């Protein structure tokens, strides 16, 4: 089957994690795969708390969650990945009776199908920006990348400063979102080098530091906006949208 192996693994893992969280007192998770004509089917079923009809209608909406500490991106990320692969996902559940997610993927999805679905997936309201995201934490990078795509932006993700510099040398970006504390180049060191390569490039920095000495370092580097870690996805997207609203023209082609 054609597809991105890492993203397809993420589909299965996210659905399994959701199933585990739905069974705080324990239970059973069943995974099934089967062919169905030209489709390949994956089912992830649990014996957990289940969902009401109202929750099922919104379960794939970005930022919708019933968890007090949740950010509501798990199932929306899955929905986005499946859509970009030309597939379908559905849910069948009842309160107190468990949940079954069914993913259907075409084994030979052609480029035209992929392109059409990708356009629908990234057709969120607002201006599309080309965003460079830099974070050495794989999980954080994956969540923010998918959230930005759902919000309508084009994203290149890098795990360190060296990769980010290479990216900016190769292409133009509207915005960079970077962590402060990373191996190799720190976020502030990276900001200085990025702005030398592309003057006027806006940089949003994630910082978990309260040390005023770091605040001065951040100011001198020319960072445009600082977001405190841990940063909710909604906060990050709002910051990116504020930059989108201030830009007259996107560099995305």
Image (tube, grey):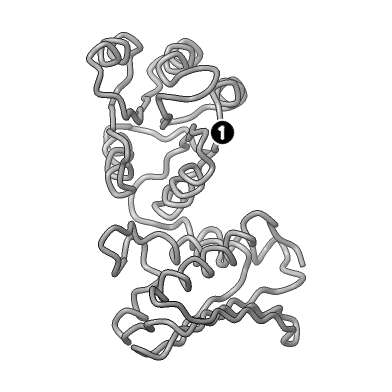
* Residue occupying the far front of the picture: 25
Along the horizontal axis of the image, is 151 left or right of 156?
left
Residue that carries the numbered disc 1 in the rendered image: 158
Along the horizontal axis of the image, is 214 left or right of 157?
left
Q: Nearer the viewer, residue 158 or 22?
A: 22
On-image quarter of the N terminus: bottom right
Q: Nearer the viewer, residue 11 or 85?
A: 11
Along the horizontal axis of the image, is 184 left or right of 25?
right
Residue drawn 34% across and 88% down?
A: 95
Residue drawn 33% across and 39% down?
A: 240
184 relative to 121, above or below:
above
Q: Nearer the viewer, residue 141 or 110?
A: 141
Residue drawn 48% across and 60% down?
A: 77
The picture quadrant where one finds residue 25 is bottom left
Residue 137 x %, y %: 50, 38
Residue 94 x %, y %: 38, 90
Along the horizontal axis of the image, is 145 left or right of 96?
right
Residue 167 x %, y %: 59, 26
Residue 250 x %, y %: 42, 35
């Amino acid at each position: 089957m054609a597809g991105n192996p890492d993203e397809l693994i993420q589909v299965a893992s996210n659905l399994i994690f959701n199933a585990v969280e739905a069974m705080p007192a324990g239970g059973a998770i069943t995974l099934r795969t089967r062919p169905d004509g030209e489709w390949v089917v994956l089912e992830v079923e649990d014996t957990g708390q289940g969902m009401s009809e109202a929750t099922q209608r919104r379960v794939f909406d970005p930022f919708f969650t019933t968890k007090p500490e949740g950010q509501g991106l798990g199932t929306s990320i899955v929905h986005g990945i499946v859509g970009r692969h030309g597939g379908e996902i559905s849910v069948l559940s009842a309160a107190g009776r468990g949940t079954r997610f069914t993913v259907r993927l075409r084994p030979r999805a052609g480029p035209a199908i992929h392109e059409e679905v990708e356009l629908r997936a990234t057709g969120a309201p607002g201006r599309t920006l080309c965003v460079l995201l830099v974070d050495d934490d794989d999980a954080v990078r994956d969540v923010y990348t998918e959230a930005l795509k759902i919000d309508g932006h084009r994203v290149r993700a890098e795990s360190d400063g060296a990769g980010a510099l290479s990216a900016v040398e190769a292409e133009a970006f509207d915005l960079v979102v970077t962590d402060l504390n990373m191996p190799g180049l720190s976020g502030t060191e990276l900001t200085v080098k990025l702005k030398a390569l592309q003057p006027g490039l806006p940089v949003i920095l994630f910082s978990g530091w309260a040390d005023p000495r770091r605040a001065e370092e951040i100011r001198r580097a020319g960072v445009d906006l600082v977001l405190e870690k841990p940063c909710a996805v909604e906060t990050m997207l709002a910051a990116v949208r504020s930059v989108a609203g201030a830009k007259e023209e996107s560099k995305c082609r």
